[in-house]
Amino acid sequence: MSENMELMGNIARGIFDDSSLQGVEWDELSVVFSFEDDGFCSGNFGYAYTKHGKETAFAVDSMEVEKVAESYREWLRQEGDKGFIKMLFQFNRVTRKVNADFEYDDPSRWQVTPKNLDRMIEELRPDLGN
């Protein structure tokens, strides 16, 4: 297994075991992690999705998961690079597939507001079933 997949697996395991998802039925999830310039994870939010399309909003409670996300950011960061400011992490618990996307400049990317709530829930929905 590559180091990249091992690190992403650590994030997935941490989210999977997090108390915020206990009692929630889900097949796929998306979590957006936000980072400060120094690499500190300043927060997260996400949605867990059932195979029938229902979503449940949540935030990862564990600081350990945020620390693993910080480590992943640092591992990916190139010398002289400021690193990403947001990471969209997606995981399917059935297929065990993971995906990550990164934002380097736009702090409003993946930002959820009352006006765009429905659109963002769909935009963040993973498609890792196949």
Image (spheres, rainbow, N blue to C red):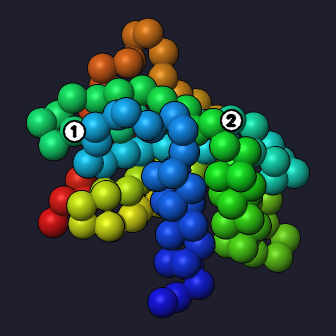
Taking the image as shown, residue 41 lies to the left or right of residue 51, namely: right
Q: SS for tag 1?
A: loop
Q: Residue furthest front?
A: 23
Name the one closer to the observer, 119 or 23.
23
Instruction: Please indicate, yes or no, whether residue 106 appears anywhere in the rendered image.
Output: no
Mark linked to residue 50:
1
* Quadrant of residue 123 within the rendered picture: top left
Taking the image as shown, residue 43 lies to the left or right of residue 125, namely: right
Q: Earlier in the sequence, mark 1 or mark 2?
A: 2
Question: The C terminus appears in which quarter of the rendering?
Answer: bottom left
Q: Residue at x 16, y 43 (%)?
A: 51
Q: Which residue is mark 2?
A: 43
Q: Residue furthest bottom?
A: 1
How far across and how far down the image is residue 6, in percent?
A: 55, 78
Using the image, determine if residue 48 lies above or below residue 2: above
Q: Residue at x 52, y 34 (%)?
A: 20
Q: Amino acid at mark 2?
A: Gly
How far across and how far down the image is residue 118, in percent?
A: 30, 20
Q: SS for tag 2?
A: strand
How far across and how far down the image is residue 41, in percent?
A: 74, 45
Name the one closer to the observer, 86 or 52.
52
Taking the image as shown, residue 36 lies to the left or right of residue 121, namely: right
Number of residues whose C-alpha sits closer than 10 Å to that of mark 2, classed few (under 14), some (14–19) or many (20 or more): some
* Quadrant of residue 98 within the rendered picture: bottom left
Q: Amino acid at mark 1?
A: Thr
How far across and how far down the image is residue 83, in percent?
A: 73, 60
How far is mark 1 from mark 2, CA to CA?
A: 24 Å
